[in-house]
Amino acid sequence: SAVISQKPSRDICQRGTSLTIQCQVDSQVTMMFWYRQQPGQSLTLIATANQGSEATYESGFVIDKFPISRPNLTFSTLTVSNMSPEDSSIYLCSVGPGAGPGNTIYFGEGSWLTVV
Amino acid sequence: DQQVKQNSPSLSVQEGRISILNCDYTNSMFDYFLWYKKYPAEGPTFLISISSIKDKNEDGRFTVFLNKSAKHLSLHIVPSQPGDSAVYFCAATWKGAQKLVFGQGTRLTINP
């Protein structure tokens, strides 16, 4: 499995500010995804980070709020913009050859954001 | 609409006994299922998976059973160990999908 590093691992953010989370993988991967886990909730996919093109967002998530970059096959960033306390979550980078049958998606350690 | 459901938010099992975690799904398109284990403030760790063409997959202490007609799968851990105490997530996907759909998780506590 790939080694996935996320920065920051934890941060306390002021309301109205933005924070960029970085995800670095130790090998080239086809697919990179960003998930969110709000307190006491399940994991929810925010978007698929596409190399060389715009990210594909899930229903309920928009580019203005969660801009994503993927400049190459080993790196991606997720920005949480204009944060509010409702954005307090663990944000998880995940990678895999794909999300279909037979493929396993691996997760990074997560970035735990608290918005005050 | 919760397509993957883990109806037990918590489970407590004595060390050495069997832990059984359950998961139900509603979407008939799902044909691949995974279990993840998650410790607090860490990312989920992949445990075991099963394709819809099988009804059982075993890996060491972990066995996953799939009942397609009932749209139900379960994870068996035997014997349970203190290090197994964590939150377990069931996830599902399908051919051509680009995402996993997760259940709400079950917190497993192994008591000495």
Image (tube, rainbow, N blue to C red):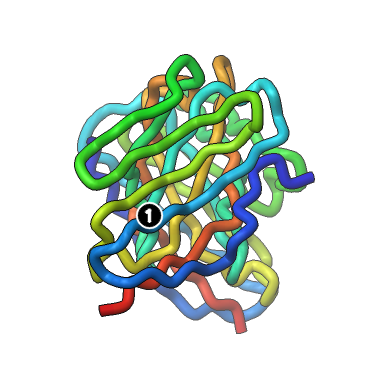
Q: Callout 1: residue from which chain? A: B
Q: Is residue B2 positioned above or below A101 on the image?
A: below
Image coords of residue B79 (percent x, y) = 24, 57
User: Quadrant of the image for the C terminus of chain B?
Assistant: bottom left
Image coords of residue A57 (percent x, y) = 66, 37
Position of residue A96 in the picture relative to residue A35 (left or right): left
Position of residue A19 in the picture relative to residue B111 (left or right): right
| Amino acid identity at mark 1 | Lys
Q: What residue is shown at x 32% (from left), y 51% (from top)?
A: B77
Q: What residue is shown at x 70% (from left), y 29% (from top)?
A: B27
Using the rendered image of the protein, determine whether residue B110 is visible from the camera's viewpoint: yes
Q: Is residue B48 positioned above or below B18 on the image?
A: above
Q: Nearer the viewer, residue B67 or B42?
A: B67
Image coords of residue B45 (percent x, y) = 33, 50
Q: As drawn, which residue projects farthest toward the bottom?
A: A116
Mark 1 lies on residue: B37
Q: Nearer the viewer, residue A36 or A77?
A: A36
Image coords of residue A72 (percent x, y) = 36, 30
Using the rendered image of the protein, determine whether residue A8 is visible from the camera's viewpoint: no
Q: What residue is shown at x 35% (from left), y 60% (from top)?
A: A7
User: Quadrant of the image for the N terminus of chain B?
Assistant: top right
